């Protein structure tokens, strides 16, 4: 029995080696090694406190994401995703040129995945003064309220926003805006909105590069009902001696007002008055319609004035007697 086991032992060892090699070859044929590139892997920053101080702030110039090319077996490459990669920038290792090495790894895969190329080896940052500035919040209404309604006013709480960030960023700010959607609204309301910051070119700025003392702004919008009423323009006074009033033309004949419904119900029409006392020629003028409405309603026409044309003509009158010829 022993002789059978030891007979041709060298051939048996060779056969075993050939079987192993063949198995490896088959594996490589079925699961070959390839390369693949994974893009926009987010770089995690650690030890940020090493750069931050009471009056300083840092900003990332480049290296917020990284692209890598890896080599691995096809079966492994097929299961890899961006989330499998870990990219770290240790800010405590900041160099004199404000650069930090980016270390990329693939946890859980050991030597099965080899990183052979990386587009960015470092994260570059800038260090600036930290500044804070107060800005008035401007309310911008988006859309149109329901027909028959008018925005009386819109108020923001708070009405000021403190913005903090790098000096180069804060210096670009032109406006802080609270945008509120009013489309189809038919009653007063309050909405919470996120503040938006615009630069001096009117472009929306990246709010991630700054911090606000309030994350949301409460905007209250008060609505009034509207009503269209007739406008009448009348004249008062007497023209200069020897002249008479002939007639008047004016525009508009109707105007739109807004107010609480109970106040609108009291207004049936508006009468405006123009004084022609001692006038001796035709009149082309304008009158302010607001002067002839109550304080309980608002004139919401774009044009707050009415244009008027008044005809005044000369008339024949007898000459006055000469007082010196009279006998007493």
Image (tube, rainbow, N blue to C red):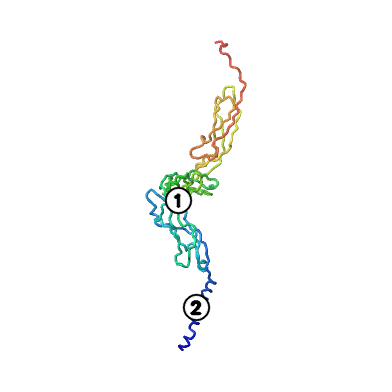
The residue drawn where x is 48% and y is 80% is: 13
Q: Regarding mark 1 in the picture, which secondary structure is present there?
A: helix
Q: Which residue is mark 2?
A: 17
- Whether the residues at callouts 2 and 1 have beta carbons within 8 Å, the answer is no
Instruction: State which quadrant residue 319 falls in.
Output: top right
Furthest-right residue in view?
316
Q: Regarding mark 2 in the picture, which secondary structure is present there?
A: helix
Q: Which mark is residue 238?
A: none
Classed neighbour count for the residue bearing mark 1: other residues with Cα under 10 Å, few (<14), some (14–19), many (≥20) = some
Depth-wise, is mark 2 or mark 1 nearer the camera? 2
Furthest-top residue in view?
327
Furthest-left residue in view?
54
Residue 9, percent from left and from top: 48, 83
In front: 110, or 252?
110
Number of numbered tags placed on the structure image: 2
In front: 128, or 232?
128
Classed neighbour count for the residue bearing mark 2: other residues with Cα under 10 Å, few (<14), some (14–19), many (≥20) = few
**Image quarter of the C terminus:** top right
Residue 124, percent from left and from top: 45, 53
In front: 299, or 243?
299
Going by the image, does 213 lie left or right of 38? left
Q: Give the CA separation, mark 2 to mark 1.
A: 63 Å
Q: Is residue 12 above or below residue 234?
A: below
Q: Which mark is residue 209?
A: 1
Q: Is residue 143 above or below residue 122?
A: above
Residue 242, percent from left and from top: 59, 22
């Amino acid at each position: 029995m022993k002789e059978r086991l030891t007979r041709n032992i060298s051939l048996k060892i060779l056969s075993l080696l050939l079987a192993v090699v063949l198995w490896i070859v088959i594996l490589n044929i079925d699961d070959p090694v390839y390369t693949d590139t994974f893009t926009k892997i987010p770089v995690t920053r650690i030890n940020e406190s090493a750069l931050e101080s009471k009056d300083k702030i840092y900003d990332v110039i480049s290296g917020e994401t990284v692209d890598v090319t890896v080599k691995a077996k096809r079966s492994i490459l097929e299961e890899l995703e961006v989330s499998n990669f870990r990219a770290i920038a240790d800010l405590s290792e900041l160099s004199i040129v404000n650069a930090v090495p980016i270390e990329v790894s693939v946890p859980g895969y050991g030597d099965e995945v080899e990183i052979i190329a990386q587009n960015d080896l470092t994260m570059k940052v800038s260090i600036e003064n930290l500044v804070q500035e107060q800005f008035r919040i401007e309310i911008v209404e988006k859309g149109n309220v329901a027909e028959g309604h008018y925005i009386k006013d819109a108020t923001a709480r708070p009405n000021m926003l403190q913005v903090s960030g790098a000096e180069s960023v804060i210096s670009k700010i032109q406006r802080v805006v609270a945008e509120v959607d009013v489309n189809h609204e038919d009653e007063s309301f309050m909405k919470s909105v996120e503040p938006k910051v615009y630069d001096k070119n009117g472009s929306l700025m990246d709010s991630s590069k700054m911090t606000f003392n309030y994350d949301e702004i409460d905007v209250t919008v008060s609505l009034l009902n509207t009503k269209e009423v007739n406008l009448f323009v009348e004249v008062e006074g007497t023209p200069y001696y020897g002249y008479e009033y002939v007639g008047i033309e004016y525009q508009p004949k109707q105007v739109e007002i807004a107010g609480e419904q109970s106040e609108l119900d009291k207004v049936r029409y508006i009468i405006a008055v123009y004084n022609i006392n001692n006038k001796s020629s035709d009149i082309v003028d304008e009158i302010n319609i607001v002067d002839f409405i109550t304080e309980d309603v608002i004139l919401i026409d774009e044009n707050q004035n009415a244009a008027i044309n008044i005809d005044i003509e000369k008339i024949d009158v007898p000459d006055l007697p000469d007082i010196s010829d009279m006998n007493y």
